[in-house]
Image (tube, rainbow, N blue to C red):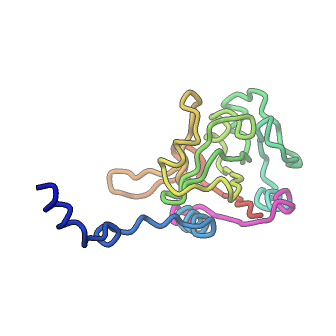
């Protein structure tokens, strides 16, 4: 019997019978998909070189008052460094500037794990404008890839566009549960 099985399989090439392996997208494909999906959520994406990041953030902020986390690593002129500002104090601030832990191309989602360059959750939820700096190297293909990079004991905030909800008539309302505007500064080397 074993001889007949070997004989029957001798002319079969396993590679012909198997579907091709999924294509792993290159970095450019991932970044382009990330930008497309983030913009689908009505967020704004501005690409810049690392040396231009400070001037791009300043241009996005304009005259808005802003708060930054203590470990941002970028001098944002006129910004208040969060040292535990109260909700009322944060409510009087127009914008927040943070970095991200990871960006997900498939879903257009930004994940914060509230490390020192991202600050505590409250600063990313109360001001009306969130300027989030994402390095192109932080963009991964999908949610499983993102989860593999996250520490399960750290709190996370997953952001897919500006805060939005719909009322019973399905009228979209923005800014109910967080920033009304999301502006992603995508740093491309």
Residue drawn at the location 57% of the way across and 55% of the way down: 140
| 158 or 11, nearer to the observer | 11
Residue 50 pos. (x, y %): 82, 60
Q: Is residue 126 above or below residue 15?
A: above
Q: Is residue 133 one of those drawn in magenta?
A: no
| Residue 44 falls inside the magenta stretch | yes
Counting from the top left corner in percent of width and height, residue 135 is at: 71, 55
The quadrant in which residue 47 appears is bottom right
**Left or right: 10 with respect to 137?**
left
Q: Residue furthest front?
A: 3
Nearer to the camera, 182 or 127: 182
Choose top left, top right, bottom left or bottom right for residue 73.
Answer: top right
Viewer-proximal residue among 132 and 32: 32
> Which range of residues does the magenta coloring cover?
39-54
Residue at x 77% of width, y 45% of height = 66
Seen at 87% across and 61% down, the residue is 51
How many numbered discs, if any? 0
């Amino acid at each position: 019997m074993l001889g007949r099985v070997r004989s029957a399989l001798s002319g079969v090439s396993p590679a012909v019978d198997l579907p091709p392996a999924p294509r792993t997208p290159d970095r450019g494909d991932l970044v382009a998909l990330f930008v497309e999906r983030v913009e689908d959520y009505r967020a704004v994406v501005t690409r810049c070189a690392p040396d231009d990041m400070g001037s791009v953030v300043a241009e996005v902020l304009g005259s808005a008052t802003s708060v930054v986390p203590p470990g941002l690593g970028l001098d944002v002129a006129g910004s208040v460094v969060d040292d535990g500002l109260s909700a009322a104090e944060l409510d009087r601030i127009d914008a927040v500037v943070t970095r991200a832990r990871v960006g997900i191309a498939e879903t257009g989602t930004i994940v914060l794990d509230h490390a020192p360059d991202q600050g505590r959750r409250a600063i990313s939820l109360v001001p009306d404008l969130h300027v989030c700096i994402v390095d192109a190297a932080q963009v991964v293909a999908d949610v499983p890839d993102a989860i593999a990079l996250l520490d399960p004991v750290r709190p996370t905030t997953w952001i897919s566009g500006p805060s939005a909800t719909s009322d019973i008539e399905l009228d979209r309302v923005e800014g109910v549960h967080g920033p009304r505007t999301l502006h992603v500064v995508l740093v491309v080397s």
